[in-house]
Every structure is written in structure tokens, then in C-alpha cells.
Image (tube, rainbow, N blue to C red):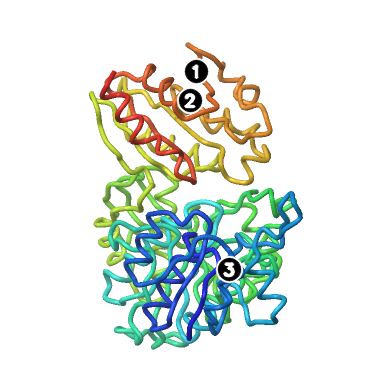
Amino acid sequence: MHIHILGICGTFMGGLAALAREAGHKVTGCDAGVYPPMSDQLRALGIDLIEGFGADQLALKPDMFVVGNVVSRARLPDGTAKFPLMEAILEAGLPYTSGPQWLAEHVLQGRHVLAVAGTHGKTTTTSMLAWILDSAGQQPGFLIGGVPLNFGLSARLGAARRPAPGNAALGEAPLFVIEADEYDTAFFDKRSKFVHYRPRTAVLNNLEFDHADIFDDLPAIERQFHHLVRTVPPSGRVVVNGLEESLVRVLHKGCWSEVSSFGEAVSDFSADGAPHAFDVLHRGQKVARVEWGLTGVHNQLNALAAIAAAHHVGVGPQQAALALGAFQNVKRRMELRGTVRGIAVYDDFAHHPTAIRTTLDGLRRSIGGTDARILAVFEPRSNTMKLGAMKAQLPWSLEPADLAFCHTAGLDWDAAQALAPLGVGPGQRAQTAADIDTLVQQVAEAARPGDHIVCMSNGGFGGIHAKLLQALQNK
């Protein structure tokens, strides 16, 4: 079929486009501000991209319009539609669907889906799981909200038949690993994306309040996670972090599948040792050892989740641990962008206070008791952070850093006031700046040899990494 994707440059929709193209469908798409790297990736696949959401795109006459959740019925100040193409689709009565629904009906059907859900670590854990299964010769398909360095791409269909069939129900079904997002599906479907995926293996990695723009409170998100649990079949398995009270509450609402726990000392899967080198215990007995380049307790837990999920489809812990030893992480997860004058500059996707804290904790643990300092440079860019819903947690999240620098553009709340417990201003522990150039100047002036600068944002952050490296070079 010919599908036309509205909002094609988002990570999820771009991955869906790549899968559809690989499956033999004709794919076109549109977005506002068509930009690299996704635009380059899509054009390399032969996918035509159109700038904007003009109603004239009806002339393409696709079999189906696939609508991303960037699209809405919003109006501009002059009263005209923000997305004229969507208005024209509705007016003409043409067929349309959401990305998750199209994926479920045309890609996931007939596959053993392994879905990784959680407030933090979804991309990393999904990448780990896909790599473990691939290393075991299972040739899984996957759709990941980032680019795993081991694969160099965010999505692929995988084998049409499972190379090494398992004994469980649908044991011959090919495997598909998907990052299962709790954000809503589309303007016409306010359920979380993951309820469409119908996994046989569901990983519940962690659960905190997030997405304040669409969820009122934590119980509202717990309800969506329970909707996911309701879709797992009796022979399926729910892999759950036993350290999370919120997930305990989710399962207490009802669970009709096997449960495999990780994290706690009494869990099915637990760890003994430092995050960079630890023994994997299965019900208290050592079954494997992981030695790898990643740091942080959060990544240790991500590894346990991936090992437990792989176990459900017949890949043993020892084989999984060996694969993790060669795991290269994901782009923008503590990715070293360069070192100048002994100062290292990293790019990281952290944008929720807990993710910021765990990222900095992991780096602090890895550099140990040296004199090296950590400079945290962050941008409160997510909808939740822009609303100021978590501003009170920022001092706690930045505590492991020696210095903190906040980009304040687009905020309706006072970042300096929120960071006051750290001390704000020149010579203080925290500084703020309304533009990138000023921020770069602040950081460059404060940096000294041996420092680790971590830039944290879920966006492009105005190209701050290259600007910082240049400023440090000119210092």
C-alpha cells in the first residue's frame, strides 16, 4: 500500500516509515522543519519528504494517512488550522490511523513482541535486549527511540521466521523488540501508545510521574501501565522492577501472566557487584557475570531487565551477559563528543530529574575519588519540565555535580529561584542563561583540565556540544 505519514521526522514515526519501506510499502511523509538526521535517513531509503502540512498533499492519494501525535486540531491566532492537511482528510472522509495502530496491524501481527516500558531507560534497555537476541542468532526486528551503536539504525523488520524456535506458545513466531512509550497515541486516541502492541513479554522497568501535559498525577500513569498488563496473554511474562512501589501497585490491580522480578535481593534476577562488573544471580544463585563499559546503577538494572526478558524467549543469562560485554550503548547516552585541553564533553538524553541524577551519579562513580569535577549543563525542554512540574526536584537531581548551568529560554518559571538551594550566580554552584552563547561562555570560563562536562537535553540543545568544544579550544 501507499502510506503518507504526517509528522514523519519524529523518532517513532521515522522508524515506522523505515519498517514500512522495508516491508515493501510505498512511503511518503511530511513534517514541519524537515531536518537531519532523520530526514537524511529517510531520503536514503527513497522516502519523499514534504515540508509542512498543506492540504494540497491530498493529491498524493495514498491508501492510508498515518497520523503522528504531533498533529492536532489546533488553530493559529488568525483562526486558520495549524494542520490544514488533517482538516482536509477529515472533510473528505479519507482513511487515517495512528502510527501505533498501523504498526500493530501491519508489522507486529503474528510476532512475539517484547515491549520495554518505563519512565527511564526504555531506549537503552530495548537496545540491550535487541542486541542480546541478535547475538543469540534470533535476528529480531526492533523499533527503538534512538540509535543503538551496535546496529547503527533505529528500526528493522528482522527475520520473517524465528531462526531458533522456542517451546512456549507461538514459539516459532519471529521476535520483535519495541520501545513501549506511555505517551498518548494521537489526537483522536488518547490511550498510551503501548496498549496497541500486545506483547507476550512486557518489561516494566520503572514508573514515576512524568508527562505533566497529559497526565494529572502518578495514579493516572499507573492506570495506563495496567492497561498494558491486561493485554499480556496467560503464557506471556511480565518482567517487573521489584524496587518500584508504583509497579507493585500496578500488578496489585491484577495480573494474568507469569511474573519475573528483578532488582531486589530476593528477586528472580539480581546483581552482586559494582555496575561496571557484576555477577548475575538467578534466585540467589550466580548464573553469569557482566563486565562492560557502562556505568551507573540504572544501567545495571537495565541489564537485569534485558536478561530477564531474553530468558523468556530461551536465551540464557550466560549468553545474555556475554552479549552485554560487547554492548556499545545508544547515541546520546553519555556519548563522548570530544576532549579539548583535558576537558571531556558528553551528550546525554537525560531530561527528567531522576534521569539527570542517575546519569550524574553514574559518572561520579566511574571517576571515583579523583579531583575531577562534573559540570552539568542542562535544558528543561520536555513538556513536563517546561510546565515547571518538577522544578523543586532540580537541586536534588544536580547534587552529584560540582557546577550546574541551566538554559532558561522558553520557561514560564524562574529557574534561578528553583536552583537557589545550590547558590546561583557568578562564582556560585549554579548559573543560568537565556541564550546558548551566554551559556557556552559561562561553562567555558568555569571549565579547567580534568573536568567532565555533561550536556543534558531531549532536544538538539542548539548545537551546544560543538560550540563548547570550539570555545574550549579558543580558551
Figure check: 437 above or below 96 = above
Residue drawn at point x = 59 percent, y = 74 percent: 196
Whether residue 381 is visible to the viewer of this picture, yes or no, is yes
Q: Which residue is mark 3?
A: 194
Label 2 neighbourhood size at 10 Å, few (<14), some (14-19), many (20+)? many
Q: CA distance from mark 2 to mark 1?
A: 6 Å
Figure check: 438 above or below 184 = above
| Label 2 close to label 3 by CB (< 8 Å) | no
Check disc 3 and give the amino acid type.
Phe
Q: In the structure shown, which secondary structural element does the residue marked by tag 2 occupy?
A: strand
- Horizontal side of 269 relative to 387 (left or right) equals left
Q: CA distance from mark 3 to mark 1?
A: 40 Å
Q: Which residue is mark 1?
A: 429
Of labels 3 and 1, earlier in sequence is 3
Q: Which residue is mark 2?
A: 404
Of labels 2 and 1, earlier in sequence is 2
| Label 2 close to label 1 by CB (< 8 Å) | yes
